[in-house]
Image (tube, rainbow, N blue to C red):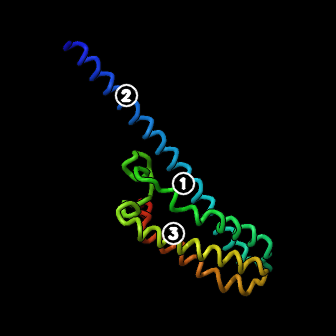
Amino acid sequence: MRTKATLTAAAVALALGAAGAALAADMAGVIQARQTHYKAIGAASKGIYDELNKPTPQASVIQGYAHQLDTLAPQIPSWFPVGSGPEAGVKTKAKAEIWSQPAAFKTAADSFAVAAHHFAATAAGGDIGAIRAEYPTLTKACGSCHTQFRAKAPG
């Protein structure tokens, strides 16, 4: 009887270990996907910045980047499931405040989504002057989330 209990306990421990490893692998994938999405947001924002700093910016180029931001920004809260922070063992700049202050994080992320949508609507109009005037609002909304919920890079 004791051998059966020992074998059962060992099987349970093995199953829990495997489940833990699978969860860690899943979280690594979640974090990597999140980082990929944020790189796309960064590239789009840089693309807008670069285009606005050209002698004759093209509204159509900015519109493409603005559409990308408008598509990705509303998804941000879904990129941070519980367990996908630093405790997952994957290098991430996500601060613990994302999970300890979920309402504040969602508010900040939603503010960026609203700003991205408004910027995309402005860009769709094709008026470079209006786009230039709206761009600081977009970057401020993006940056406010960084300040509160993203760790600075070491160095």
Q: Which of marks 1 and 2 is nearer the N terminus?
A: 2
User: What is the residue that sits farthest to the front in this orientation?
Assistant: 1
- The quarter of the image holding the C terminus is bottom left
- The earlier-in-sequence mark between 3 and 2 is 2
Check disc 2 and report its element: helix, strand or loop.
Answer: helix
Which mark lies nearer to you, 1 or 3?
3
Crowd tier of the residue under label 2, counting other residues whose Cα lies within 10 Å: few below 14, some 14–19, many 20 or above: few
* Three-letter amino acid code of the residue under disc 3: Ala
Describe residue 3's horizontal placement relative to residue 79 as left or right. left
Q: Quadrant of the N terminus?
A: top left
Question: Hey, what amino acid is under mark 1?
Answer: Arg
55 sits left or right of 8 in the view? right
Residue named by callout 1: 34
Residue 109's tag is 3
Residue drawn where x is 58% and y is 81% of the image: 137
Task: Assign a secondary structure to mark 3.
Answer: helix
Q: Report the label total.
A: 3
> Which residue is under mark 2?
15
Residue 23: percent from left, percent from top? 43, 40
Picture coordinates of residue 142, whole percent (x, y): 54, 72
The amino acid sitting under disc 2 is Ala
